[in-house]
Image (cartoon, rainbow, N blue to C red):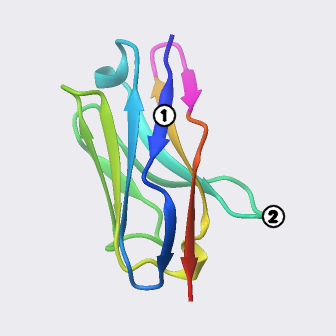
Amino acid sequence: QVQLVESGGGLVQAGGSLRLSCAASGRIFSISVMGWYRQAPGKQRELVASITRGGSTNYADSVKGRFTISRDNTRNLLHLQMNSLKPEDTAVYYCNLYYPLNAFNAWGQGTLVTVSS
C-alpha cells in the first residue's frame, strides 16, 4: 500500500519561493515515476513536473526555469522548489506516484499554494 503526504504549501507574495515536499510510504517509490500536479479553482488538474526513477525531468512550459523537481530515493521523498511565484501559480498541488509495470497510480491529499499579487 502506498501513501503520499504533501507538505510545504502556504501563502506567499508574488516573486517569492516555496518548497513542497511529498513523503511516500511503501516499497515502490524508488522505481516509480513521480510527479507534481496542480488544480486551480474551476480548472482541470494539470501536470506541473515529473521525474523518472533515473532522474530525468519534465516540466510544464508555464513553470520552466522557475520550478525544480527532485527526489531522494533513500528517504522516499519528492520535492518541488518553486521560485519567482506568480498569482497564476495559485492552486492545490498534488503529489503523484505512477508505477508503470501495472499502471498503478497513487495521489496525495494535496497542499494549497496561494500567491498574492
Residue at horizontal 50 percent and vertical 81 percent from the top: 86
Q: Is residue 57 magenta?
A: no
Residue at horizontal 60 percent and vertical 70 percent from the top: 90
Disc 1: which residue: 5
Residue 64 in picture, x, y percent from top left: 37, 70
Disc 2: which residue: 42
Q: In the image, is residue 81 above or below residue 75? A: below
Q: In the image, is residue 71 above or below residue 27? A: below
Residue at horizontal 61 percent and vertical 37 percent from the top: 109
Q: Residues within 10 Å of mark 1 (few under 14, many from 20)?
A: some
Residue 79 in picture, x, y percent from top left: 33, 47
Q: Determine the residue located farthest toward the left in the rendered image.
A: 74
Q: In the image, is residue 19 above or below residue 37? A: below
Element marked by disc 1: strand
Q: Amino acid at mark 2?
A: Gly
Q: Residues within 10 Å of mark 2 (few under 14, many from 20)?
A: few
Q: Nearer the viewer, residue 86 or 49?
A: 86
Residue at horizontal 40 percent and vertical 85 percent from the top: 15
Answer with left or right where residue 55 lies relative to residue 11: left
Residue 16 in picture, x, y percent from top left: 38, 79
Residue 52 seen from this side: no
Q: Determine the residue located farthest toward the right in the rendered image.
A: 42
Element marked by disc 2: loop
Q: Which residues are magenta?
A: 100-107
Image quadrant assignment for residue 67: bottom left
